[in-house]
Image (cartoon, coloured by chain):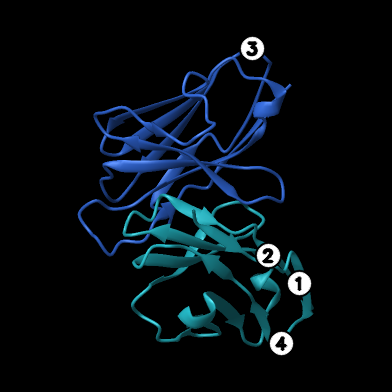
Chain colours: A blue, B cyan
Amino acid sequence: GAVVSQHPSRVICKSGTSVKIECRSLDFQATTMFWYRQFPKKSLMLMATSNEGSKATYEQGVEKDKFLINHASLTLSTLTVTSAHPEDSSFYICSARDWEDDNSPLHFGNGTRLTVT
Amino acid sequence: AQKVTQAQTEISVVEKEDVTLDCVYETRDTTYYLFWYKQPPSGELVFLIRRNSFDEQNEISGRYSWNFQKSTSSFNFTITASQVVDSAVYFCALSEGANAGKSTFGDGTTLTVKP
């Protein structure tokens, strides 16, 4: 079964509104989670690294004020797309690994398909 | 800078055929990890394999096998006796050190297995 839960799986919102996406590790704790964005028929692009108890680390070109990341606990990270625009429409995927197991592979959530109208 | 190239954008085979998905990578790191993931139409990424740069042994898992060759910077993935359920997008990825989250992904290969 899934070990990383992402919610919602699909969301449609209007331009100018904000949308929050949750990423939860179910069977393990994760001090670090990762947020990716995937355009249709394209590869995954790392947006940011979410760090529990501290600020997220954003990749070059990713607007931190637009994509707010909060890692409130060892099992939950949230990505908020603020003032959404149609160009923010995409597939967002989070991932996490068990911080107590160095050999643990990266587990991905099922993704969130965001459509901004 | 790291780079992963999956030259095959789309592959179509008939069930029971063998198929190899190519992956070529570039990195200046001496320690790195290579991954393959499967993304079915439902969207989630399924982890298939991880290989570190010091382990060049080929691996077989059921109908899946992987050929890692540092000399050619390649990490190819072969599915033997393909099945319709193998239809998906397959991604090869490269990460620096153990921090697998900061991975560079290839553009993916869409595999279609026809009955």
Asked if labels 2 and 1 touch by Cβ distance under 8 angstroms, the answer is: yes
Distance between the alpha carbons at the discs numbered 4 and 1: 14 Å
Query: In terms of depth relative to the viewer, which is nearer, A64 or B18?
Result: A64
The image shows residue B63 at horizontal and vertical percentages of 55, 85
Q: Which residue is mark 1?
A: B11
In the shown orientation, is residue B18 left or right of residue B12?
left
Q: Which mark is residue B112?
A: none
- Locate the C terminus of chain B by quadrant: bottom right
Q: Which residue is mark 4?
A: B16
**Residue at position x 46%, y 54% from top?**
B103
Residue closest to the far front: B28
Amino acid type at mark 1: Ile
In the shown orientation, is residue A26 left or right of residue B89?
left
Considering only vertical position in the picture, is B81 above or below A109?
A: below
Image quadrant in which you'd find residue B24:
bottom right
Q: Which residue is mark 2?
A: B109
Distance between the alpha carbons at the discs numbered 1 and 3: 40 Å
Q: Which residue is mark 3?
A: A16
